[in-house]
């Protein structure tokens, strides 16, 4: 059995606004929302079709709060691939996603950088 990367943690200020944003803007599916007590929840979301998951973790310390939106030190942290770049981009724009740039062509495909609800940078990537 080969290991694989299944889940990545994203630190957020609050669970419910983050869940709503990822579902509405990116079309993610809510895989799990388990109450762990004392205000903690295990929340996992996945892009349509699955394969990987995002674990939404609410910041509970000042250090964690300071990391919200800067988890990759200002670099693109996440890469969202789509088979239909133009349709996905249009949907995201209609839902209020903040794109840092207009779509551009790269050797690896069509790409545009956007920010999630917390300010983290993502690449939206489609076929060339």
Image (tube, helix red, strand yellow):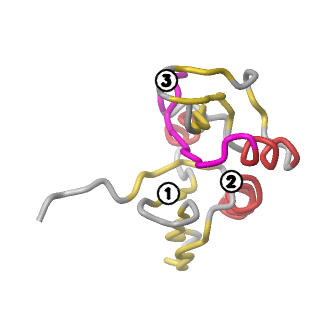
Mark found first going from the N terminus, 1 or 2: 2
In the image, which is nearer the foreground, mark 3 or mark 2?
2
- Quarter the C terminus occupies: top right
Q: Which residue is mark 3?
A: 73
Residue 55 coordinates in the image, percent (x, y): 48, 59
Q: Does residue 26 appear to the left or right of 76 in the view shown?
A: right
Residue drawn where x is 75% and y is 30% of the image: 99
Residue 110 coordinates in the image, percent (x, y): 61, 29
Sort mark 2 into few (<14), some (14-19) or many (20+) by Cα contacts within 10 Å. Answer: many
Q: Which residue is mark 2?
A: 26
Q: Which residue is mark 1?
A: 54
Q: Does residue 118 appear to the left or right of 6 in the view shown?
A: right
Determine the secondary structure under disc 1: strand
Q: Is residue 77 magenta?
A: yes
Q: CA distance from mark 1 to mark 2?
A: 12 Å
Residue numbers of the magenta segment: 72-86
Residue drawn where x is 55% and y is 37% of the image: 127
Q: CA distance from mark 3 to mark 2?
A: 23 Å
Does 96 appear above or below 31? above
């Amino acid at each position: 059995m080969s290991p694989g990367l299944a889940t990545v943690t994203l630190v957020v200020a609050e669970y419910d606004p983050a869940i709503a944003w990822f579902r509405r803007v990116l079309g993610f599916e809510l895989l799990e929302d388990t109450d762990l007590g004392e205000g903690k929840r295990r929340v996992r979301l996945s892009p349509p079709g699955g394969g990987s998951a995002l674990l939404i973790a609410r910041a509970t310390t000042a250090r964690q709060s300071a990391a919200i939106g800067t988890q990759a030190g200002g670099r693109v942290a996440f890469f969202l691939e789509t088979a239909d770049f133009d349709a996905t981009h249009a949907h995201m724009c209609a839902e209020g996603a903040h794109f840092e740039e207009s779509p551009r062509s790269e050797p690896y495909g069509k790409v545009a950088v956007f920010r999630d609800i917390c300010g983290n940078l993502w690449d939206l990537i489609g076929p060339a």
